[in-house]
Amino acid sequence: MLSEEDKASIPLAEVKTRVVHATLADQGVFDDTLGLMDKLAQAVRVHEGLVFVDKHKAAGACKPIGGYTVRSGHVKVTLNLKRDGKIVGSKTVTGTDEDLDAVVSQLVAAVAEGCAIAE
């Protein structure tokens, strides 16, 4: 039998949030004209607290969905975060079409925060 001290010293696996492919579209043309779905998938793959699941659906996984507008170079993304068919978070992020990396950084932060699994 292990003592309580020994048990406490055993590192446990870190719980990470699983994220499936996002569904994002420019609301004017109903297509992902900025390529945000692929950019977000790439950002999730390298995020420390998230695990990308290369599927469009998976039980218990978070699915980012939403739409965006592009007007005069300004991008506004309205994001809903769903898990098992229920919205678990919402966020609006803004930026410019010349700095989509900044927009994607905000999106991945919103996913990490809004989809976090309570321990």
Image (spheres, rainbow, N blue to C red):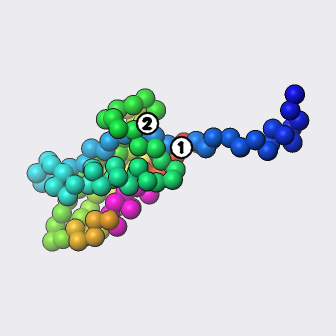
Q: Are marks 2 and 1 in contact (CB under 8 Å)?
A: no
State the residue in front, 87 or 32: 32
Taking the image as shown, residue 30 lies to the left or right of residue 74, namely left
Taking the image as shown, residue 86 lies to the left or right of residue 56, namely right
Estimate the x, y position of residue 75 in percent, counting from the top left: 24, 64
Q: Give the magenta range.
A: 102-109
Taking the image as shown, residue 119 lies to the left or right of residue 70, namely right
Estimate the x, y position of residue 53 in percent, counting from the top left: 39, 38
Residue occupying the point 26% across, 62% down:
76
Q: Quadrant of the N terminus?
A: top right
Residue occupying the point 44% across, 57% down:
109
Residue 93, above or below 14: below
Estimate the x, y position of residue 21 in percent, counting from the top left: 32, 42
Q: Rate crowding at label 2 as few (under 14), some (14 to 19) or many (20 or more) other CA atoms within 10 Å.
A: many
Asked if the magenta segment contains residue 108, the reply would be yes
Asked if the magenta segment contains residue 29, the reply would be no
Asked if residue 88 shows in the view, the reply is no
Number of the front mark, 2 or 1: 1
- Determine the secondary structure under disc 2: loop
> In which quadrant of the rendered view does residue 20 lie?
top left
> In which quadrant of the rendered view does residue 107 lie?
bottom left
Q: Amino acid at mark 1?
A: Lys
Taking the image as shown, residue 7 lies to the left or right of residue 107, namely right
State the residue in front, 119 or 46: 46
Asked if residue 5 shows in the view, the reply is yes
Residue beneath disc 1: 16
Residue beneath disc 2: 61
Residue 33, above or below 88: below
Residue occupying the point 84% across, 40% down:
6
Q: Quadrant of the C terminus?
A: top right
Q: Which mark is residue 38?
A: none
